[in-house]
Amino acid sequence: MPIPAPFPGLVIGYSYLWSHERKKGMAEGVKDRPCAIVLVKSEDDGGHKIVTVAPITHSPNDPKRAVQLSPKLKRHLGLDDEASWIVLDEMNRFAWPGLDLRPISRRHPGVFSFGVLPVDVFEQIKAVLNELRAERMLTRVISREP
């Protein structure tokens, strides 16, 4: 299966680099995880689209700066049964597809997408991002380029 075209709301497998990992000098995330694409910008000088992703985690630092996924949505995406949030006060930006795009599982080595977020969830994401932007509470970690 080919790598999908990126678009906001697509949930991908990605080696997410947290800001605390970057501060330790790491260039790649410790764990591959689902991440939601929140923004796709036009192509850079190398012809790549610039994609911004937000990590999905079981333990957000501040749930007020995240959007919780419902059990129904987690089942739809094929994720585990534990409570999860899309963290929105920290994101990675990279040139698509980049070196950190990952298959969603070993059973599906050619599949890079878990699925798409529903419109209402993406609207929640946009609302939280607008609040965080107004409060200047966003941290963007720039990952490796291709």
Image: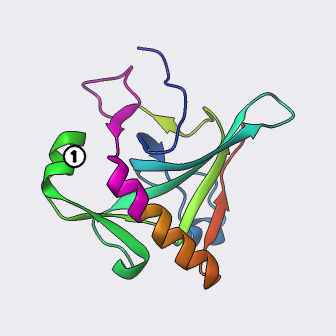
Q: What element carries label 1?
A: loop
Q: Residue at x 47, y 43 (%)?
A: 14
Report which residue position mark 1 lands on. 79
As drawn, which residue projects farthest toward the top? 1
Q: In which quarter of the image is the C terminus?
A: top right
Look at the picture and state if 89 lies above or below 10: below
Quarter of the figure with residue 113: top left
Q: Which of 40 and 145 is in front in this view?
A: 40
In reply to whether residue 130 is colored magenta, the answer given is no
In reply to whether residue 105 is colored magenta, the answer given is yes
Q: Is residue 38 left or right of residue 135?
A: left
Q: Nearer the viewer, residue 116 or 123?
A: 123
Look at the picture and state if 110 lies above or below 87: above
- Image location of residue 140, percent across then percent down: 64, 65
Can residue 24 be seen in the rendering of this structure? no
Q: Residue at x 30, y 33 (%)?
A: 105
Quarter of the figure with residue 92: bottom right
What is the magenta range?
104-124
Q: In this view, does 80 lie to the left or right of 122?
A: left
